[in-house]
Image (cartoon, rainbow, N blue to C red):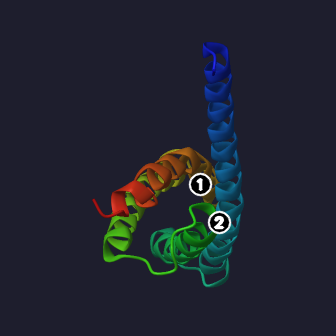
Amino acid sequence: MISAHMIAAIQHRLREYRHFNLVKQFAIYVCVGGMATLVDWTTFYSLTHVAVMHYYPALAVSTTLGTLTHFTLNKLFTFKQSSHASKKLILIYIIIVSLSFGLNFLWMTFFVSFLHLHLMFSRMLTTGLMLIVNFALHKGITFNKALYSPR
């Protein structure tokens, strides 16, 4: 017979396992985000310092390239979605990314235009501020398998 103590121990192990998976998934998300950030920041720096482009269009281009990298790598490695992205997944991703881009734009404007911080430092601060927000949105909405499974 299974005792209440054994059931409690099993439940505790399951919670630990779920916690470990969340930490592992977040670590992968951070690594993937690091790669996408490298694409974003390199593009942003190149456009603002080499091509001498204003930071608004540079932000749009660099964010787009970083976002494409981010989507592809997260889909394959972090949240392990099937290779065929549904229209619903892509639409939700675009909505989340648009919201994120708007927040990025506001933070960049605040840091550069109001606080007069350096462009790259402002880009780094903005990226850091958005890390947790983006993970929560993508885990809870964009790549939430329950939203895409047939009912």
Q: Which mark is residue 37?
A: 2
Corner quadrant of residue 40 = bottom right
Residue type highlighted by circle 2 = Thr
Front-lying residue, 55 or 29: 29
**Image location of residue 36, percent across then percent down:** 63, 69
Please rate how many residues cluster around mark 1, counting C-alpha atoms within 10 Å: few if below 14, some from 14 to 19, many from 20. Answer: some
Residue type highlighted by circle 1 = Thr
**Image location of residue 148, percent across then percent down:** 36, 63
**Image location of residue 75, percent across then percent down:** 54, 70
Q: Residue furthest left?
A: 151
Front-lying residue, 141 or 125: 141
Residue 105 in sight from this viewpoint: no
Residue 69 in sight from this viewpoint: yes
Quick check: marks 2 and 1 in contact, CB under 8 Å? yes
Helix, strand or loop under label 2: helix
Front-lying residue, 89 or 129: 89
Quadrant, the C terminus: bottom left
Residue plotted at (67% across, 82% down): 50
Quadrant, the N terminus: top right
Helix, strand or loop under label 1: helix
Q: Which mark is residue 127?
A: 1
Residue plotted at (56% across, 52% down): 126
Q: Residue furthest bottom?
A: 51
**Image location of residue 109, percent across then percent down:** 46, 54
Corner quadrant of residue 150 = bottom left
